[in-house]
Amino acid sequence: MKKLLFVAILAFCSAAYADPQPVPGTPFDRYVTPDTLGRQIAFYVSKSGSERLPLALIIQGSGCWSVFTQHSAGQISGWHQNTLFSIAANRFRVMIVEKPGVGFLDDPINPGTAENCTDEFKKGHTLERWMEALKASVLAARNQLNIDTTRMLVAGHSEGGISSAKFAADNSFVTHAAILSGSGPNQLFELTAITRKSNQNLPENEREAAVDQIFQDYKQILSEPNNWTKLMWGHPYLRWTSFLATSTLQELKRSNAKIFLAHGTEDLSVPIESFDLNRAEMLRMARDVVADRREGAPHNLNKPGQNGPEGMREVLTAVANWFMSN
């Protein structure tokens, strides 16, 4: 009931373009802005005093889960934007954008996939359309809020790393980009690399058959590239067609931003080789890059002995200090 009442209030305020609405129990206000595709995009920016502060946009990973969660006792908590806010210490304002087709407090089964997402999300979640939503939100914040526009950070985890790299490449006002457990050359390469690694105990012919199946599956996607109802690897064909049309590495090369890379050596979602390649190419091009190669860490960046969000907090602390001192 609390969720329904709060969502109803937010919907009314969005339609009326009223004053920003606070998210109860969090340091964030909710805003709504139209994008170039005619959608109403919800975004959240941390509260601030009168001081003019730079903006740090953090981009979530794959799936259709809301960036805020309501717990059984009724309290609301946020994703990594809350962690980044606690680290910011009034040095910058933190921003996050809700994906179009995702409702406030949505918490689907299998949240990292599109399996239980709305049709609106499945039809609309392409990299290009996501960039439009992000850009509209950032421009609204820069134009309407007390933002220092001389520097800006974009940081993203997993799929958010791909998005962060492209957003930095597309928008020259981004001065710093942090790719956390993000892709490298492309996700198709990474799917094959992870498949080979996770099946290393199988006989070679079985292992290579599993790898070849990835390529066969992708050929199936290419036969219906705009199909948003059929899923492969947990996401619509359309999503894969869009995201595989780009490369995090190529977007990093195309951007002018300073680069921060963080990745775990035991990541079973994106191979550590992608991180190594990104780092090598940035150094080869004499780019300004900081690299945190986290020994023994999986996709969530926790080193051995770390629990919960400890690894991410450690990384985001380093990102925040780098952003404000470089």
Image (tube, rainbow, N blue to C red):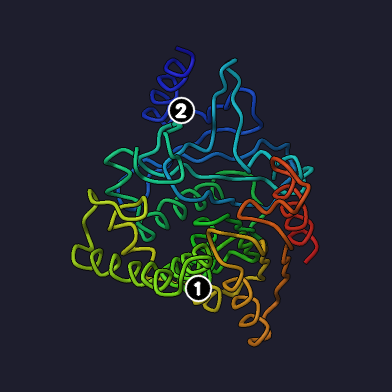
**Residue 18 circle label:** 2
Name the amino acid, label 2: Ala
Residue found at x 54% / y 63%: 270
Q: Is residue 80 above or below residue 262?
A: above
Q: Quadrant of residue 253?
A: bottom right
The residue that label 1 is drawn on is 251
Whether residue 165 is situated above or below residue 89 in the rendered picture = below
Q: Nearer the viewer, residue 139 or 3?
A: 3
Q: Position of residue 166 (x, y in %)?
A: 48, 66
Q: State which quarter of the image contains the N terminus.
A: top left
As drawn, is 103 to the left or to the right of 76?
Answer: left
Q: Residue furthest top?
A: 1
Tell me residue 306's x, y (percent): 76, 46
The residue at the point 60 percent across, 60 percent down is 267
Location of the C terminus (image quadrant): bottom right
Callout 2: helix, strand or loop?
A: loop
**Outermost residue, front side:** 203
Where on the picture, by quarter, is residue 179? bottom right
Residue 44: x percent and y percent?
A: 55, 39
Amino acid on which the number 1 mark rests in the picture: Glu
Q: Give the class, few, some or many, for how many residues have Cα within 10 Å of label 2's Cα (few <14, many ≥20).
A: few
Q: Residue at position x 61%, y 68% from top?
A: 272
Secondary element at tag 1: helix
Q: Is residue 223 left or right of residue 110?
A: left
Q: How many marks?
A: 2
94 or 53: nearer the viewer? 94
Q: Are marks 1 and 2 in contact (CB under 8 Å)?
A: no
The reply to whether residue 171 is in sight is: no
1 or 2: tag closer to the N-terminus:
2
